[in-house]
Image: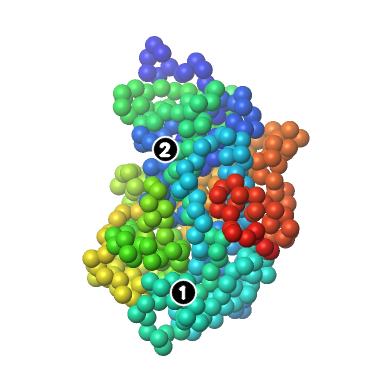
Amino acid sequence: MTNNDNITKENPDVILIGAGIMSATLGMMIKVLEPDVTVEIFERLDVAAAESSDAWNNAGTGHSAFCELNYTPEKPDGSIDTSKAVGIAESFEISKQFWAFLIQNNLINLPESFIRRIPHMSFVWGEKNVEYLKKRHAALTKCPLFKGMQYSDEVAQLRAWMPVIMEGRDPAQKVAATRMEIGTDVNFGALTRCMFDYLKEQDGVKIHFHHEVRKLKKTEDGRWQIKVKDLATEEKRKLNARFVFIGAGGGSLPLLEKSEIPEGKGFGGFPVSGQWLVCTNPEVINRHQAKVYGKAAVGSPPMSVPHLDTRIINGEKALLFGPYAGFSTKFLKQGSYFDLPLSIKANNLRPMIIAGFKNIPLTRYLINQVRQSPEDRLASLREFVPQARKEDWKLETAGQRVQVIKKDAKQGGVLEFGTEVVSAADGSIAALLGASPGASTAVSIMLSLLQRCFPERFNTEKAQTKIKQMIPSYGESLDKDAALLQEVRNMTSEVLGIKETEPVQI
């Protein structure tokens, strides 16, 4: 290049912004479906998966809706709405099929600790909550995806399932739990880095770390011109692409706003930070073997559902409790305190104000969380682990989440808890906003994005055949076809190394 503002001579077909699980998944799919497509990936940090996809930051390790009670709300008539849980459980099965395809075809070489079998449990106390959990169990087990879920309110059984949680508990307290033996723990950081290791060796793929995308602009020929700065050399350059995906976690909203597409107008972001209590006592760590989720406090965000969580991180067993929510104006853990104020525009000010007024209990909850003392945090832990000792736990910072605020014709503005893909009408640009269950459903989200943004290519016979190879259940309904579910579960369990001693029975 003769100067810093020249446009690169060899422009890619696709630009992916952010080196997290979403960009990695989309990049893999694109190169499998159309190997000749050229791709460039830009990441602000110096490594992949260092923000939300990192094991220490990501609260969504193996979300499959087996134990997360916020995915099964109770309706006004007292019945349980299972629709979201069923959708997430099926999406996770789709993700496992894609990962199995990558392994079977020697596209990635994953460490053993990438995915492990670990029971998923829900635990509640109090008569009303026990009644809710029993109804939830009855409703979910009607669906093949949740067959095998056990329910118990017998103290002896609960002690066998989770001794650390039951020891020292008031014997008069009414308690209950559900348990799914086929739950998993997933290290999305390891998975993401393995996919990028493959991508960087492919023809037509370039990955740039320590590069920040500063501007996006649509050109007259329908392409997108982006301006990128190399944070190490301060060099700036421009390049064009036919398609841009913004998968930058909390950094997606500011870039979506810079694109100025009509579909992105009115979106805002509400950042929520988090902290973990991490166990330092090997004896306690080894005595607990499950992901145990409770009920969220009134007014708290779904990402703050308390859970005592066994993880495998960097090959070692860890035990985390939390997350304790907090508030920061940063959109990323390594972001700027100006992220939130700079994201407020004329087109999203009204939805953000209205959503704020409607979520005053959430604001109050976050303020209380920020003001918590170490003794307050220990008291919360002891609701789960009655005999917890302060000296066995240390406080660690978790990742940032940016919940979506969007315009609503009836309500003016609503705060959404989940993920949302925003794309231009012509399919030339798309951005992923939001948080949980995110990573666990990345494959389904990226399939939908490809269908939305590349309908002509996606719907060809060649592409559909390839997708069916990647995801054998594609086009079928796993929540209704028990035989197909058993078949794909047994296949993925074998390939991923999480096979039960007995075949999965439906």
Residue at x 37%, y 60% (from the top left corner): 319
Expressed as whole percent of the image width and height from the top left, the position of residue 363 reads: 37, 64
User: Quick one: 482 or 462, which is closer to the camera?
Assistant: 482
Residue at x 53%, y 72% (from the top left corner): 178
What amino acid does circle 2 point to? Ala
Quadrant occupied by the C terminus:
bottom right
The Cα atoms of the two marked residues, 1 and 2, are separated by: 40 Å
Residue at x 46%, y 74% (from the top left corner): 160
> Crowding near pointer 1: few (<14 within 10 Å), some, many (20+)?
few
Q: Earlier in the sequence, mark 1 or mark 2?
A: 2
User: Quick one: 403 or 346, which is closer to the camera?
Assistant: 403
User: Quick one: 163 or 190, which is closer to the camera?
Assistant: 163
Q: Quick one: which residue is furthest to the bottom in this view? A: 172
Please say if 285 is above or below 190: below
Expressed as whole percent of the image width and height from the top left, the position of residue 329 reads: 33, 51
> Total of numbered circles in the picture?
2
Label 2 belongs to which residue?
Answer: 48
Label 1 belongs to which residue?
Answer: 160
Q: Quick one: which residue is furthest to the top in this view? A: 2
The kind of secondary structure element at disc 1 is helix
Expressed as whole percent of the image width and height from the top left, the position of residue 103 reads: 58, 40
Badges 1 and 2: C-beta atoms under 8 Å apart?
Answer: no
Left or right, residue 198 beside residue 465: left
Residue 19 can be seen in this image:
yes
Residue 322 can be seen in this image:
no
Expressed as whole percent of the image width and height from the top left, the position of residue 367 reads: 31, 65
Residue at x 69%, y 33% (from the top left corner): 457
